[in-house]
Each structure stands twice: as C-alpha cells, then as structure tokens.
Image (cartoon, helix red, strand yellow):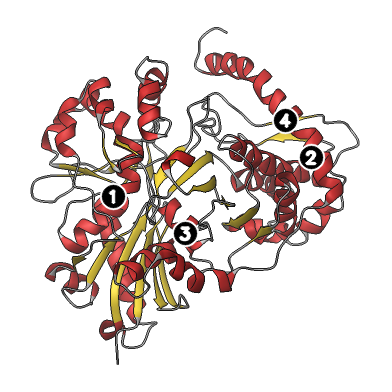
C-alpha cells in the first residue's frame, strides 16, 4: 500500500491527540488520552514532561489500531501543542524540572513590573506581543531569582511541542511563531532576545534553540522514538507552529487579503486576524496581544486572547448544578445544555451587560489587568436564569469585538471554532456583535489538522498553503449564520457602554485586588 497518511499530534493542556488524515484532509482516525497537571499553592502549574511524552507515544500506538496498515502509509508526522510555558532539558536530553504551563502565575509580578518599565515599549514594538506571566521570558527570570540551580543545569529551553519534537527526532528546536513572539522580531522572523538582558537574565540566551520552520524543513524519526511509537525510523517529522496558529489554519483563517477573522471559543477565547505582510500589522495602544509568524510567505497572525471564554458558561451552569445537587438532583453540564440555546434566544437582546472576566488571573486581551473580574451590570428582579445566560453569551461576543477592534477593522467573515461553535445562540451573538457572517469548519480537530497542513506543504504534496487550504478547509465550511439586523443595531449601541463600563471599573478592580491580597485600598 502506498504512503497516503499524514499524522497530526496536538498536545493540548487537557488532552493529547494523534490524528490521521488523508492527503485531501479527510480525518481517518483519532486517538486521545487525558492530560494532567499539578496546581501548586504558590501559583505554579506544572506538568510531568516524561509522562507527556509517554502519553503522546501511546496515542500514536493507539492510532495504529484504528487505521489499517498505518506503519506503511505514513508520509510524515507533524506536532503542535499548547503555547507559552517553560520545558527545560539538560545536556543529556532529560527534563531538568517539571514543565511550567501557560497557566502558571509565579512570574506575574515580574511581568507586571516589566510592562511598567521604559523597556516595555521597545519590546512590544519588536515582538508585537504583550508580556504576561505565562511567557517563558519572565519565567526564566523567576528561576534566576528563586531557583538558579535549575537554570544552571539547563542546556536548552523549549515549549510543549518542541519537547515532543525533541523526543521524536533528537533535535533541539523552536518554531518561528513561539520564538518570535517570546524573544524575537516579527519582521525578521528571528531572535531578538534583548528582553532577557532587561529582565536581568542575559545568560539565558544560551538556552534558546535553533528556529526550525516546519513548512521548509523536517527531521527524521529517531530509532528510539520509532521503537516507542511503532512507526518506521526516518519518517519525516515536522515541527508545527504553536497550537493557536495551527487551529486558526485548520479552522479557516488563511486568506490572502486578510478579510477573515477566526475565533476559538474554548475554555479561553482567541481572536485572530491574518496580516498579509508585516506592514499590515496594527499594534494597539494597550500593548497587548500576540503577533505570530504564520506558515505562509510573509504572513502574520495577530491575536488577542480572553483568559476565559466558555469557562464563563461553565461557571453559570455549575451554579445551577450545585443548587440542584443540594436538593438531591444530579445533572451534568451536558444535561443543562440541552435546550439552552432556545431558552437563551427566547429572551430579549441587550437587557443586561456581562463582562466575561471570570478567570482568577484577570484579563490579557485587549487590555492587561490581573485584577479584572467578571460582572453583571443592569440586573433587576424581573430577570431570570435565561437572562443571565443570554448576557453571558452576549458578553463573549462583545469581548470578541473588543479584541478585533484592537487589531484594526472588524473582519468581513468570521470562522468560529472550539466547543462554543456548536451553539447556534453563540454563533448568532458573534455574527450580530461583529456584523459579519459566521461559519464553522465542520472538523473537530482543527489544531492537529493545521499541523498536518504544514506537513503536506513541506512534503510538496501541495505547492502552497493556498492550494492546501482550498482542499483541506474550504469544503468543510458549514453554513453561514448571518447577523440579525435588529440585534446588530442594538449591539452597536451597547458596545460603547460595554467599553466604558470596563474602563470605569479598572481602578475599582485594582482596589479590590489590593484588599484580597491583605492590603489597603
């Protein structure tokens, strides 16, 4: 049987997946295993690196049970994974310490101090990316101050997908997207790690691995890895871009003219637009967001990210579940979601404002404020549970508009992916708040698909990403959800109020944060 399968690995925060695709982008099989991490009292969030590799290898072995003759059919393996964080390995290639995830907040004070320093403006201009606690640059600075012995044992610093790439190939590398937005220059797609000097950890520059662009280069599967996963040694392995770039690519972001926006409505919210060139990048006054290399010549993905997206919905569902449980009635989130769209859509639009800052880490897009918290504005006694939930849905749509507005004109078409994309009510809210049609790619594994798309272009199956996207993505676009003209007009009037309320609350959030920390407002 001829080689006709591309494998995409997506090592997410909660699940690791290996997915087999045909050359035309059809999903042939998927194997997944739950991921796990440990939350520490000091704000640390850590993951066992050895277990992450073991679990990823297991998904690849399990995939062979689901796809006939997989071993003889694989053209290439591509890997992507959760972004940010710190995965450190020593000279022998062993983990120096548990990985720090993007959820880790230990370096929050260092990040906040840096964003207030004179050096921050130049860093933001180079990277097009705001600095926050989840990034490796400030995490390395934390290590120097609090655990220098770990830094001393480290030979190279990586991210999740880089670690798996190392285990698959033996090559120490980072992709252009994470290398640039953490330490580099989005205009040159190279390192520009002056931030390490400014953070007082210049010696960490030696830890930065070579940048490997997966759309141009691959490395062979090592003999040890081949034995661990059951595939042929020498199989090309492609280092994908960070998971959000791959999800955007697999979710329909590619567009030569930059008219399309792509939002991921998952636990967190990511809102992306494609800049056809570096000159088309718009940096916002708040100095937030991400600017990432995109796997197409000259193109860049601009992103603003909400710390919490569907987590806001989960929170309100869980309030209902807790109340029911107190009366001896057990219901799952799935139970409560049944019929929820219809109940939400039956309530009038825009009667109640909700700012969806439910994360205990505050907000990072399009403004950076660790003290930001969620709130309802405009409650009265006539409102019920469905009104609250409608306000939450609308709040997520307003948060998306807030993020897109920080990156330039609103997109003319929206691609919506993530778990929230399954909700017809949320699709309508997004369409009406952004005044643009919303379509979802009818593919569950957009991240793995994006990584695989990089591999098929690198392997010359397609001559360009444009031709690949035309085959892999366009046929899977679902029907349009068009804006409701009446709701859209109402949302246009409400959005400035949403923004003003947010701005007016910032000193109050700050005062509350100080009180929570035991200080005085």
- Secondary structure under the numbered disc 3 in the rendered image: helix
Name which residue lies at 36% across and 71% down: 463
Q: Nearer the viewer, mark 1 or mark 2?
A: 2
Name which residue lies at 40% across and 21% down: 121
- Distance from the alpha carbon under mark 2 to that under mark 4: 10 Å
x then y, percent, for residue 280: 49, 41
Q: Nearer the viewer, mark 4 or mark 1?
A: 4
- Distance from the alpha carbon under mark 3 to that under mark 2: 29 Å
The correct choice, above or below, for 59 with respect to 350 in the image is below
Q: Residues within 10 Å of mark 3 (few under 14, many from 20)?
A: many
Residue occupied by mark 1 = 48
x then y, percent, for residue 304: 52, 39
The correct choice, above or below, for 38 with respect to 198 in the image is below
x then y, percent, for residue 107: 35, 27
- Distance from the alpha carbon under mark 4 to that under mark 1: 41 Å
Residue at far top of view = 520
Q: Cβ–Cβ below 8 Å for labels 4 and 1?
A: no
- Looking at the image, tell me whether mark 3 or mark 2 is earlier in sequence order: 3
- Distance from the alpha carbon under mark 1 to that under mark 2: 45 Å
Corner quadrant of residue 3 = bottom left
- Distance from the alpha carbon under mark 3 to that under mark 4: 31 Å
- Looking at the image, tell me whether mark 1 or mark 2 is earlier in sequence order: 1
- Secondary structure under the numbered disc 1 in the rendered image: loop
- Looking at the image, tell me whether mark 3 or mark 4 is earlier in sequence order: 3
Residue 491 circle label: 2
């Amino acid at each position: 049987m001829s080689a006709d399968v591309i494998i995409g690995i997506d090592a997410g925060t909660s699940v690791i997946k290996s997915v087999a695709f045909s050359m035309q982008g059809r999903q042939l099989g998927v194997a997944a295993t739950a991921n796990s991490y440990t939350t520490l009292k000091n704000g640390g969030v850590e993951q066992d690196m050895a277990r992450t590799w073991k679990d990823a290898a297991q998904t690849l072995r399990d995939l062979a049970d689901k796809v006939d003759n997989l071993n003889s059919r694989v053209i290439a393996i591509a890997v992507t994974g959760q972004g940010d964080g710190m995965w450190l390995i020593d000279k022998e290639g062993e983990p120096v310490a548990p990985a720090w995830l993007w959820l880790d907040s230990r370096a929050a004070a260092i990040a906040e101090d840096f964003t207030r320093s004179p050096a921050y403006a130049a860093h933001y201009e180079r990277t097009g990316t705001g600095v926050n606690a989840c990034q490796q640059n400030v995490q390395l600075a934390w290590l120097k101050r609090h655990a220098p012995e770990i830094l001393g044992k480290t030979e190279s610093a990586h991210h999740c997908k880089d670690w798996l790439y190392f285990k698959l190939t033996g090559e120490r590398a980072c992709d252009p997207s994470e290398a640039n937005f953490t330490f580099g220059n989005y205009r040159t797609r190279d390192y520009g790690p002056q931030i390490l000097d400014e953070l007082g950890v210049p010696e960490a520059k030696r830890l930065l691995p070579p940048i490997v662009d997966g759309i141009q280069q691959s490395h062979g599967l090592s003999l040890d890895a081949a034995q661990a996963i059951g595939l042929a040694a020498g199989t090309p392995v492609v280092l994908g871009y960070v998971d959000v770039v791959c999800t955007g690519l697999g979710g329909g972001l590619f567009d030569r003219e930059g008219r399309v926006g792509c939002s991921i409505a998952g636990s967190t919210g990511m809102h992306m637009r494609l800049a056809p060139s570096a000159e088309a990048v718009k940096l916002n006054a708040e100095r937030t967001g991400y600017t990432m290399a995109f796997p197409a010549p000259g193109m860049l993905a601009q992103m603003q990210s909400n710390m919490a997206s569907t987590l806001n919905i989960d929170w309100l569902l869980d309030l209902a579940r807790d109340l029911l449980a107190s009366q001896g009635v057990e219901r799952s989130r799935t139970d409560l979601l049944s019929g929820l769209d219809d109940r939400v859509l039956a309530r009038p639009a825009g009667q109640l404002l909700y700012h969806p800052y439910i994360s205990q880490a505050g907000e990072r897009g399009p403004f950076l404020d660790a003290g930001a918290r969620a709130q309802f504005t405009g409650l009265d006694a006539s409102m019920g549970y469905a009104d609250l939930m409608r306000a939450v849905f609308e709040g997520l749509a307003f948060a998306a508009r807030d993020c897109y507005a920080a990156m330039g004109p609103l997109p003319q078409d929206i691609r919506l992916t993530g778990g929230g994309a399954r909700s017809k009510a949320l699709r309508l809210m997004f369409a009406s708040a952004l005044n643009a049609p919303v379509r979802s790619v009818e593919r569950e594994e957009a991240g793995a698909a994006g990584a695989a798309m990089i591999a098929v272009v690198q392997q010359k199956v397609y001559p360009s990403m444009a031709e690949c996207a035309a085959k892999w993505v366009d046929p899977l676009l679902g029907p349009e959800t068009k804006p409701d003209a009446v709701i859209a007009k109402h949302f246009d009037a409400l959005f400035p109020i949403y923004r003003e309320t947010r701005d007016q609350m910032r000193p109050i959030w700050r005062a509350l944060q100080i009180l929570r920390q035991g200080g005085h407002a």
